[in-house]
Image: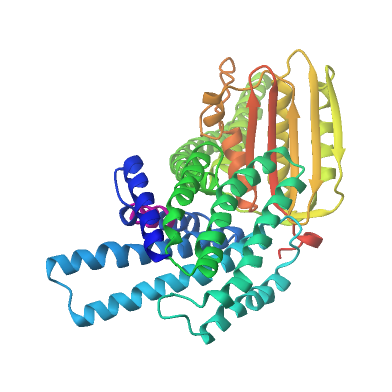
Amino acid sequence: MGSSFSARAGAVEKRLYAITGTDVPIFMLFVLIGLWTIGLLLVVTDPRRSTTRWIASIAFTGGFGGLSAVINEQLGPYLTRQGWMTASLSQFMGYMERFSSIICYYGLPYTFLMFTIVYHPNSGGWLWKRWLSWVLLLPSLISFAFEPLPSDPIPYQFVMCWTVPYIITGILLLIHATAKELNSYLRKLRMLTTLAAAPTMFGALFTLYILPTLYGNNQWWRYNAWLIGFTLAVIFFSSFRYGFMGLQISIRNHQLDYTLRAITSGTSILNHAIKNDVGKIRLFGEKIKSESAQSDPGQLENDVDVILNASQHIYDMIYRIQGQTQDVALHEEPVRLAELLERCLTALEPSLHRIEVLRELRYEGALWGDPAQLDEVMTNVLMNAVEAMPQGGKLLVKLTETKRNLTVEIRDTGIGMDKSQLRQAFDPFYTTKGGKKLNFGLGLSYCHTIIHKHKGTMSIHSKPGVGTAVFIIFPNRKGGGRG
């Protein structure tokens, strides 16, 4: 049996070499680098979100499997060939190889199941997930009480009893979450996540647990290189085009934050200079006005009133610009999104005479947020939708609730945007309204920043000639509290 499998393993390595130009251990080195890089990016860009932390844990535990293979089949033999291998170093590397294997074998099913639980839209509150995470960890801890066979890294007979249901349950939860999602944008993201995780975990179920248990050989892991390579390709593709677990959005947030801070610095200097000069104008204007009654006719007083009104207008504009470009501080309170959206639509009524407005406001509860800033965001998005339909059309304003999210969908049947315009939609100073000289292109950039400060996400889907859909998603915090 052993020689037969060795022949099959050698054939696999030859096929991998023919495709990748390298052998399995070297390929596993790239797997290790790829998985740990993705894990680090996810943790660095969005460390507070539980789903991000758990999927990063999957990447790290899977990467330990690659590290075990690299130590055993690449690093160890290399050190031996160079004559650098000593008894103590050999013992240390043996410990590291076994430690890495255990982390992968025991950690992968556990982190995968926990990720699918917190990722599911009906996962509920965080308290029960906290104690559940400890309960689900028990089988892996109990596994240390069982002694594996001399040639095996783990006690396969016992470990298979809990790893198989963990992985199968996780895959079913991913599929169910995708099928249950009603929001078209979120469903696409869930499909990509399922595509990235489910096939690889299903393959690992057999290569790491079932086949070694049934056939008594632990070398089936070599087949995992194909599946992990597929997963990395899906993550790489989706991160650039759609975003993967918030990775694309988080990177964009940092870019926007840096750019908006640069805008803030320049605007602050401008504000200071203009306010000083306008302050002088106002002081001298008031002085002239007070003296004009004694020496000059009423016309001079009227002229000075014009100057004073103009200076007040400049003040108002300065404060408006400053309020939209500085690092905005939220003044939070319970906000009823349905009522806020209705107010925004009422304010835009004069512009809606050719547009059919469809309201689907299915949530009457409150969100903890800044009402003034959220009003500005919704008004901005609605105005963009209205301006995209100069000849009329349909405007859908939809508010829905799940256990985890509140989603505002604003969809128009206007001119739409092509892919190039869509990629730049959130960039400061970018605008598609070229005919409007006073449009500075800060609207969507500002909206994106405000939504991010509310711990939410904002995304746009659009096709030329079809229309545009904007999705604004907030975490659902019951009762409108800070929780």
The main secondary structure of the magenta stretch is helix
In terms of image quadrants, where is residue 403? bottom right
Q: Nearer the viewer, residue 147 or 457?
A: 147
Figure quadrant of residue 354: top right
Q: Residue at x 59, y 39 (%)?
A: 446
Q: Is residue 319 visible?
A: no
Residue drawn 47% across the image and 81% down it: 148
Q: Is residue 311 above or below residue 52?
A: above
The residue most toward the left is 83
> Which is more toward the observer, 370 or 148?
148
Residue 357, above or below 434: below
Quadrant placement of the N terminus:
bottom left
Name the colouring of the figure: rainbow
In the depicted view, which residue is nearer to us: 430 or 278? 430
Q: Quadrant of the C terminus?
A: bottom right
Residue 30 counted in the magenta span? yes
Residue 32: image location, x then y, percent: 38, 57
Q: Residue at x 53, y 41 (%)?
A: 238
- On screen, residue 281 above or below 25: above
Magenta-highlighted residues:
27-35
Residue 444: quadrant of the picture: top right
As drawn, is 127 to the left or to the right of 253?
Answer: right
Left-right relation of 255 to 50: left
Residue 17 drawn in magenta: no
Would residue 320 be found to the left or right of residue 392 on screen? left
Residue 206 visible from this viewpoint = yes
Q: From the top left corner, tell me how far across and down residue 101 is, in percent.
A: 43, 70
**How far from the left and from the top, in percent, is residue 70?**
32, 62
